[in-house]
Image: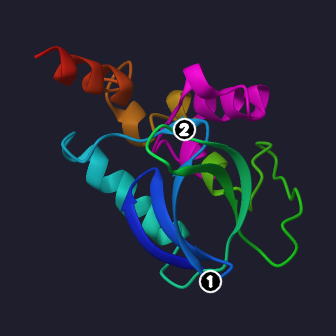
Amino acid sequence: MVLSIGDGDTVTVNEAGARLKVRLACIDAPELSQIPYGQASRQALQALLPLGSQVSLRIKATDRYGRTVAELLTGKNNSNISNQNNINQNNINQQMIANGQAFVYWNFISACDRERYARQETLARLKGLGVWAVPGGLERPWELRSHSRQR
């Protein structure tokens, strides 16, 4: 069950009675400081995962901060229901990419369906959705973090 949304790629869930901080696998959402895109990404995730939503985790790893890295799945049967754009409607990570609310995190894509995520990002870019409303897309969150560390 979803307990809180931290930003566009981090949630806290109750999994088997324990609080678990989850980093959405294979995507990277704008930082909250990337106004207005970071807040829009967080709001998009909140819309997809209202507090109390039931989710299943497709766990991929644990990151260096101790967070569980996973794809989040919603729906009663968590089947791979796909539409004409090949988006798994139950996969929140894929929906964030398809809606232009996050970037594919190419350095960490190996745990996910690379081709599906690439198609979704390309479609979002071509439609100018979310982060792609800025020509070429706004500064990637991993680049922003890298620049911040260098200062």
Q: Tell me if 118 is positioned left or right of 128 in this view.
A: right
Q: Is residue 49 above or below residue 102?
A: below
Q: Quadrant of the C terminus?
A: top left
Q: Is residue 112 magenta?
A: yes
Pick the front one: 119 or 68: 68
Residue 10: x, y in percent? 45, 55
As drawn, is 11 to the left or to the right of 83? Answer: left
Q: Quick check: 77 left or right of 93?
A: right
Residue drawn 65% across and 50% down?
70
**Residue in the picture at 89% in, 63% down:** 79
Task: Rate crowding at label 2 as few (under 14), some (14 to 19) or many (20 or more) other CA atoms within 10 Å.
Answer: many
Image coordinates of residue 38 in percent, x first then y, are: 29, 47
Classify mark 1: helix, strand or loop.
Answer: loop
Figure check: 35 above or below 128: below
The residue at which mark 2 appears reads as 27
Q: Residue at x 60, y 26 (%)?
A: 108
Q: Is residue 145 magenta?
A: no
The boundaries of the magenta stretch are 95-123
Badge 1: how crowded within 10 Å, few (<14), some, or many (20+)?
few
Residue tagged 1: 17
Identify which residue, 4 or 93, lies in the foreground: 4
Distance between the alpha carbons at the discs numbered 1 and 2 = 26 Å
Q: Which residue is more in the foreground, 122 or 77?
A: 77
